Image (cartoon, rainbow, N blue to C red):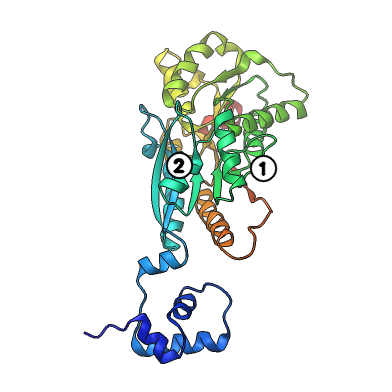
């Protein structure tokens, strides 16, 4: 079987081997006439450059780094949040011809994202699970200063401008509380996630905004915190129990905590019909499987993953060109949607 070489393509087109490489890898300015001669010669000889050679020519490894938090006691890939985002990332990366390199970081260790580019040879990086931490923020600043293409998903930092793709959690939380207020509930408890995550702070802002619009004062005794796990929802149930007669409704910052809260209250002897109206967040698959089915704020996690890949690869392409990378910061915020089910309906509306 005859396999043409780059040298033979160059000879047939009457150009250098370097020119053949530039044409086939679309690198640098070239005359149209030269491009056409090289492409015609390659087609005639059936020449196909190796993917390895293409990667070197384009200065790309073909690897997209995805940074995840390392949580020993959590099954991250089984959680709706991570699985949906990773599905979106994986689908778009495959479409773009990239392989994923999963990189786990220990929350207790110093973070140095620059090392990932130097040691792991990744082309671009997507960061999941970033949180408010001076060391982490400093490392992200260095990434930005050195021009490495990276993007945060579902996290932003006050006073910092990083590339990020997020959902509108202020609006999502506001929708949930507004839905409960519209039914006449006024004593609404809020089970939030850790304040070190911007989406927790955004949800609290939405909660407070909805109360303020209805001229309702904040009662801090109705504020609870979990860590997004089902277990933390069950723990919150024990803390809410003494106040349960004073609580009309509950908003939880994710479905896992909401489900843990439902189950925890039942285990404490509270009948289902006495559990306050409840809204979760994420609209995971499990939301429809609870009894009663859980109302929840739908977040487009899959789309967040897809968009993050598209944008970070755009940054990679621009940073490798002869033109300076764009100074404009990519900050995308996708809308959320409240999905109403039985768990958040008042007894009066059910009777009607």
Residue 273 percent location from the top left of the image: 49, 21
Please indicate whether residue 74 sits to the left or right of residue 251 in the image: left
Task: Tell me: residue 276, above or below residue 283.
Answer: above
Residue underneath mark 2? 67
The tag earlier along the polypeptide, 1 or 2, is 2
Task: Tell me: residue 215, above or below residue 38.
Answer: above
Residue at the image position 51 percent from the left and 20 percent from the top = 275
Q: Nearer the viewer, residue 17 or 159?
A: 17
Residue at the image position 59 percent from the left and 51 percent from the top = 147
Q: Find the distance from the CA under tag 1 to the CA under tag 2.
A: 19 Å
Residue 340 percent location from the top left of the image: 56, 38
* Whether residue 233 can be seen here: yes
Residue underneath mark 1? 161
Determine the image quadrant of residue 279. top right
Q: How many labels does the image show?
A: 2
Mark 1 neighbour class, 10 Å CA radius: few under 14, some 14 to 19, many 20 or more: some
Residue at the image position 56 percent from the left and 44 percent from the top = 143
Q: Which of 77 and 131 is in front in this view?
A: 131
């Amino acid at each position: 079987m005859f396999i043409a070489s780059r040298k033979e393509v160059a000879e047939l087109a009457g150009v250098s081997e370097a020119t053949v490489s530039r044409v086939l890898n679309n690198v640098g300015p070239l005359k149209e006439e030269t491009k056409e001669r090289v492409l015609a010669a390659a087609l005639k000889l059936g020449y196909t450059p190796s993917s390895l050679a293409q990667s070197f020519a384009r200065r790309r490894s073909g690897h997209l780094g995805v940074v995840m938090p390392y949580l020993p006691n959590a099954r991250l890939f089984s959680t709706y949040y991570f699985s949906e985002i990773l599905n979106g990332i994986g689908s778009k990366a495959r479409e773009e011809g990239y392989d994923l390199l999963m990189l786990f970081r220990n929350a207790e260790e110093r973070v140095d994202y620059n090392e990932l580019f130097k040691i792991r040879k990744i082309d671009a990086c997507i960061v999941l699970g970033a949180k408010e931490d001076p060391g982490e923020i400093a490392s992200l600043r260095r990434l930005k200063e050195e021009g490495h293409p990276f993007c945060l998903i579902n996290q932003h930092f006050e006073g910092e401008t990083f590339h990020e793709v997020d959902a509108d959690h202020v609006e999502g939380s506001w929708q949930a509380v507004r839905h409960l207020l519209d039914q006449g509930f006024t004593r609404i408890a809020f089970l939030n996630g850790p304040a070190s995550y911007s989406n927790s702070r955004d949800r609290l802002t939405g909660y407070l905004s909805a109360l303020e619009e209805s001229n309702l004062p904040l009662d801090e005794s109705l504020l609870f915190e979990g860590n997004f796990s089902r277990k933390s929802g069950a723990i919150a149930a024990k803390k809410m129990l003494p106040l349960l007669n004073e609580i009309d409704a509950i908003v939880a910052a994710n479905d896992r905590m909401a489900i843990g809260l439902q189950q925890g209250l039942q285990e404490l002897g509270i009948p289902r019909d006495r559990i306050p109206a409840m809204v979760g967040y994420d609209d995971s698959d499990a939301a429809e499987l609870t009894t009663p089915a859980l109302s929840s704020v739908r977040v487009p996690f899959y789309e967040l993953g897809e968009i993050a890949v598209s944008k970070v690869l755009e940054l990679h392409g621009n940073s490798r060109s002869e033109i300076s990378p764009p100074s404009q910061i990519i900050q995308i915020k996708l809308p959320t949607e409240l999905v109403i089910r039985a768990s958040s309906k008042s007894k009066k509306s059910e009777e009607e």
